[in-house]
Image (spheres, rainbow, N blue to C red):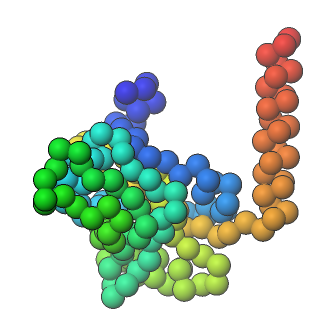
Amino acid sequence: MSKREEATGRKIIATNRKARFEYHILERFEAGLVLQGTEVKSLRQGRASIGEGYASVEDGQLWLFDINIPHYEMGNRANHEPKRPRKLLLHKAEIRRLAGKTTEKGLTLIPLALYFTRGRAKIELGLCRGKKAYDKRESIKRRDQDRDLQQQMKER
């Protein structure tokens, strides 16, 4: 574990770096996951992909779709389905609020990070609005300027 992970008590499994480039993150939420036994074992090995995932509210419950947790290698015939929908655990008031927000045009729930906190699997969700092409160009320009500035500071 890195010093940062030790300080926060988190063991990060997967992050969605692309989400920060593709979307404006308006709010962040931490939610628990309902998992099967072999899914937890696979996550403990650090094997998960959240890049193309999203969450939505259906029938008053929050569900996570298109997250890939590969089969546990030592699992038997009771192994889990890798891309099955997974239920997320949030307070009912938060779910109602998110249901209202996601019906607005252009807002969606995107997974930002998957991690363990005190032995429990959690996922950080972001309420996001998609960036336009000019916003992405601005992000690239700002990143390049920061990199150049860091290089100049390093040279001095």
Image position of 107 with respect to 60: above or below: above
Residue drawn at point x = 58 percent, y = 49 percent:
17
Q: Which of the two residues, 94 or 60, is positioned nearer the viewer here?
A: 60
Can residue 78 be seen?
Answer: yes
* Quadrant in the picture for the N terminus: top left
Residue 29 in sight: no
Identify the residue at horizontal 64%, vertical 84% (top origin): 105
Q: Dividing the image into 4 quarters, which one contains the C terminus?
A: top right
- Across and down, in percent, residue 102 comes to 53, 80
Relative vertical location of residue 84 with respect to residue 97 in this rendering, above or below? above
Q: Residue at x 66, y 62 (%)?
A: 23
Q: Is residue 3 left or right of residue 92?
A: right
Give x and y (percent) for residue 22: 67, 60
Using residue 125 as the reference point, say whether residue 58 is left or right of it.
left
Residue farthest along the front direction in this orientation: 77
Q: Is residue 95 above or below residue 131?
A: below
The picture places residue 25, in percent across and down from the top left corner, at 61, 61
Pick the residue in front: 36 or 143.
36
Q: Which residue shows up at 48% across the image and 69% down it? A: 54
The location of residue 69, given as percent across then percent down, is: 34, 55
